[in-house]
């Protein structure tokens, strides 16, 4: 049961049965593709007010796709809880902080929820290039990853380390090379962490996985099918939120507000995601709410964030937002003992499915 805003401060953890609907086979539910140029597909400037491209016929394997990157703050573990709260009949799905894309792939796996169209965004330019290459050039990517995986798996510790630092230290040549290098480093670096320094240079050390799956070809091909017809952009979230309108669904998973001064991890891009950013995001959520767009947001249960979405003031005072929490596990922390269970805040601006079913008829 969701907590009303008035009760949100208690946020007691409560038992909830997972309501994830397993994939029940795939129904083709997309219209034929429009003529879209390669230039359209790669365009990553601010999203114009124009609608996302028309949905395409998606291949059946799209429903089997899973995230192909390990990503700090990735929602793989709690995604059943999130999917259970997603609205039915999504016109266009927007995910402005796509990261590893756990929610996007989970929605596609459920025929009842799979959106007609999707627009995925992240401020991390290289990450979006990886998505573009998976979508548009998966054969070349597979070949390049194979060439990286073979020597790595055959090498001893020293040889692996040398290959890792050689890859990390060089400039990629073109999008396919960039995507292969990105995936290689993601699978072989410490903890699968993505972190850059102030100059935007990836600086995570080598990890010690015995047999990392650098190339997961079936999943990359499934992800390529899932991304067919999807619009990809790399702009600030505010620009990405200009287009959604009534009937659309936006899932927001910004970098976490740290629970303590020392637990901070916001290094996905050169900049950091400060409280100012969190406030800017809250204003964008208010704006989407006024426009009748369904919004789900996840974040840490830090008091400041909780206060933003439960404050009893402003135009949405009262119970505009449903605030709930769900147990999660932080997978990425340099200290293993700090990777324990932790609650995740979930904010909705629409009634959850259970509650809608309970509404008396005529409402
Ligand atoms: C918590 S992660 C998203 C994780 C994702 N939900 C998943 O399941 O893997 C947050 C993402 O926001 C991106 N980001 C940070 N600042 C941003 C901004 N101002 N606009 C858009 N994306 C941003 C980061 O690059 C990062 O990938």
Image (spheres, grey):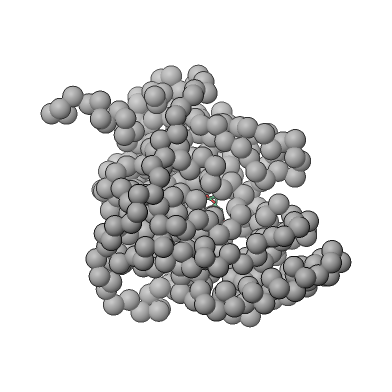
Left or right: where does residue 23 sit relative to residue 175? left
The answer, for residue 199, to whether it is visible in the render is: no
Query: Residue 265 location, x and y as percent?
Result: 66, 46
**Residue 185 figure quarter:** bottom right
Q: Quadrant of the N terminus?
A: top left
For the residue pair 300 and 65, the one nearer the viewer reads as 65
Question: Which residue ends up furthest to the front in the rendered image?
Answer: 25
Tell me what residue is drawn at x 52 percent, y 23 percent. Answer: 13
**Residue 230 figure quarter:** bottom left
Left or right: where does residue 304 sit relative to residue 112? right
The answer, for residue 2, to whether it is visible in the render is: yes
Tell me what residue is drawn at x 55 percent, y 68 percent. Answer: 217
Q: Classify 342 as above or below 108.
A: above
How many circles with numbers are drawn on the protein? 0
Query: Residue 200 location, x and y as percent?
Result: 67, 63
Q: Classify 13 as above or below 241.
A: above
Question: Which residue ends up furthest to the right in the rendered image?
Answer: 158
Q: Quadrant of the C terminus?
A: top left
Q: Classify 15 as above or below 182.
A: above
Query: Residue 56 location, x and y as percent?
Result: 30, 67
Tell me what residue is drawn at x 42 percent, y 66 percent. Answer: 225
Tell me what residue is drawn at x 40 percent, y 57 percent. Answer: 63
Left or right: where does residue 268 sit relative to residue 289? right
Query: Residue 272 location, x and y as percent?
Result: 62, 50
């Amino acid at each position: 049961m969701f907590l009303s805003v008035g009760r949100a401060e208690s946020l007691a953890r409560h038992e909830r049965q997972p309501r994830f609907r397993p994939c029940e086979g795939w129904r083709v539910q997309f219209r034929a593709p429009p003529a879209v140029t390669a230039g359209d597909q790669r365009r990553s400037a601010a999203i114009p007010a124009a609608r996302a491209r028309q949905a395409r016929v998606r291949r059946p394997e799209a429903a089997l796709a899973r995230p192909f990157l390990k990503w700090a703050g990735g929602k793989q573990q709690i995604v059943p809880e999130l999917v259970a709260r997603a609205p039915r009949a999504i016109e266009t799905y927007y995910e402005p902080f796509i990261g590893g894309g756990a929610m996007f792939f989970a929605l596609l796996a459920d025929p009842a929820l799979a959106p007609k169209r999707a627009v995925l965004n992240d401020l991390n330019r290289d990450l979006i290039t990886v998505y573009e290459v998976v979508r548009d050039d998966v054969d070349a990517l597979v070949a390049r990853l194979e060439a990286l995986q073979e020597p790595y798996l055959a090498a001893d510790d020293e040889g692996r380390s040398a290959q890792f630092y050689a890859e990390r230290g060089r400039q990629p040549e073109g999008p396919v090379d960039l995507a292969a290098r990105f995936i290689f480093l993601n699978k072989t670096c410490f903890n699968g962490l993505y972190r850059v320094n102030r100059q935007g240079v990836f600086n995570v050390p080598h990890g010690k996985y015995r047999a990392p799956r650098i190339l997961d070809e079936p999943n990359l091909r499934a992800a390529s099918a899932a991304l067919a017809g999807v619009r990809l952009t790399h702009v600030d979230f505010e620009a990405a939120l200009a287009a959604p309108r009534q009937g659309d669904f936006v899932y927001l998973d910004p970098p976490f507000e740290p629970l303590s001064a020392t637990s901070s991890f916001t290094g996905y891009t050169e900049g950091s995601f400060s409280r100012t950013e969190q406030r800017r995001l809250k204003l964008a959520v208010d704006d989407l709410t006024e426009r009748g767009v369904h919004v789900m947001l996840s974040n840490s249960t830090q008091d400041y964030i909780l206060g933003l979405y439960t404050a009893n003031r402003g135009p949405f005072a009262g119970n505009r937002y449903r605030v709930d929490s769900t147990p999660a596990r932080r997978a990425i922390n340099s200290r293993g003992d700090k990777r324990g269970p932790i609650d995740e805040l979930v904010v909705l601006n629409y009634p959850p499915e259970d509650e809608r079913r309970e509404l008396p008829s005529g409402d």
